[in-house]
Image (cartoon, helix red, strand yellow):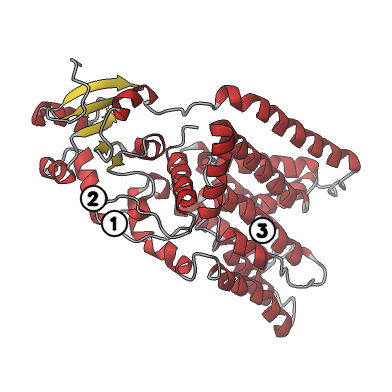
Amino acid sequence: MSDPDSFWHLRLGDLLLQQGSLSTPDWDTQDHRHWVLTQWLPELASAKVEAWFGLPGVMWLFGASLVALTLVVHGTARAHAGTLASGFATALGLVAMSGSLSPRPHMLTYVFLAITVGVWLAVERADQLPRPPWLLVPLTWVWAMCHGMWFTGPLVGVAVCIGLALDRRAERRVLGRMLAVPLLSVVVAALTPVGPSLLLAPVEVGGIGRYITEWQAPSFRTVGPAAGALLIVLVAGTWSRARERTPWTQILLLALAAGWTVLAARTVTLGAIIAVPLAAAVIQRWLDRPADARTRAEWTVIAGTTLATLSVLALVVPHTSSEPGGVPDGLSPQLAALPPGTAVLNDYAVGGWLRWSHPDLDPLVDGLTEAYSIDELEDYGKMTTASRGWEDLVDETGAEVALLPKDSPLAVALEQTMGWCVAGIDADYAVVQAPTTAGGTGCRST
């Protein structure tokens, strides 16, 4: 497990278990800003799994979520295309999603969104509109306890309902019942244990998006966003050349997929999930033959492959995932020697790991950015780039120990300008400490 944010999710789950309630834990930030728990259910579950099985158990859960996502996305595609077309569309979709697949609660958003898309497309494709998909309401209630992007499901529902109205598929009374599904989904999201504050959580964290890499605009020169864009182009290009009229419902879904794809690197996956079944249908049209029906043999292969994958994964993870990856674990002895409560001026990428592996220390920053004010994040950016006034900002933190990439501007500036020295190096990270650091282990030449 090397994803920087996975560790603070585990730590947050531990804190919730320790306090035995869903009151927001104190995250030891400088201004103690109020924030809302939006992912507490998978955090609790992951913390429990880690307590029972260690990191291998957590990584097995991640593998299981990947399998579940693949199965559900393929299922939405297979409902509208044959084996070849759905397989190709699913594979291309997974390439588009690859940049966001990591052991974090957002995996549940991807699975739930794929289920939601599949259900609404089944409604749209029916010859006669079936009963409203009421099951999406309790699904959204669970979803709202798992991840802050639960609202993407109701957005799909609203898009489909508007499309059904534009296509004049049903009378106003029937459409009203359909629209009640996404509206009730929003209502039940406010009835989770966190309460109505959950509805405003996406707005409250909107201002910090510019400080988070995955919320920046995607680069379509990279594989994932390029594959997501290709899905959109395949569908739009095929529809533009078709003789028959494309239903408004599908046009609005494709527009929604395109919007998510261009919005941010993180949301490319959302766009791909919506676009995959649409792409599968147009690829099937290229083949110029009817889609083959599902057979018992196909179900057997899928079930057997799923069982084999999860079984092999359970055998492998104890040997591959027992220790965290991509972190300076070799510096743990120096960090453990520091007095409890020591402020650590850390690199953003290891903040979550510090929270999890050394809970008695006080990292300056981590991936739980909604717990930090914009002023804190701006000051952190000035420090890490050693911009004007960085020395005063370092003094204000009260930190006399830093954990930074050894050649970073701040690490070099601390040594050359403020007289700090390197106490240890591991995995390209250095523990840098002030000359008066209490509990320090001594400095050595770089």
Estimate how packed mark 1 is, as few (under 14), some (14 to 19) or many (20 or more) residues with alpha carbons within 10 Å: few
Which numbered disc flags the more N-terminal residue, 1 or 3? 1
Q: Is residue 292 visible?
A: yes
* Front label number (1 vs 3): 1
Foreground residue among 369 and 231 = 369
Whether residues under marks 2 and 1 lie with C-beta atoms below 8 angstroms apart, the answer is: no
Residue 349, quarter of the rendered image: top left
Where residue 270 appears, as percent x and y from the top left, is 56, 52
Q: Residue 22: x and y, percent?
A: 48, 59
Q: Amino acid at mark 1?
A: His
Q: Is residue 186 above or below residue 28?
A: below
State the residue position of label 3: 117
SS category of the residue bearing label 2 = helix
First in sequence: mark 2 vs mark 1: 1
Q: Residue at x 36, y 26 (%)?
A: 328
Would you say 26 lies left or right of 424 here?
right
345 horizontally vs 200: left or right: left
From this viewpoint, is residue 209 visible?
Answer: no
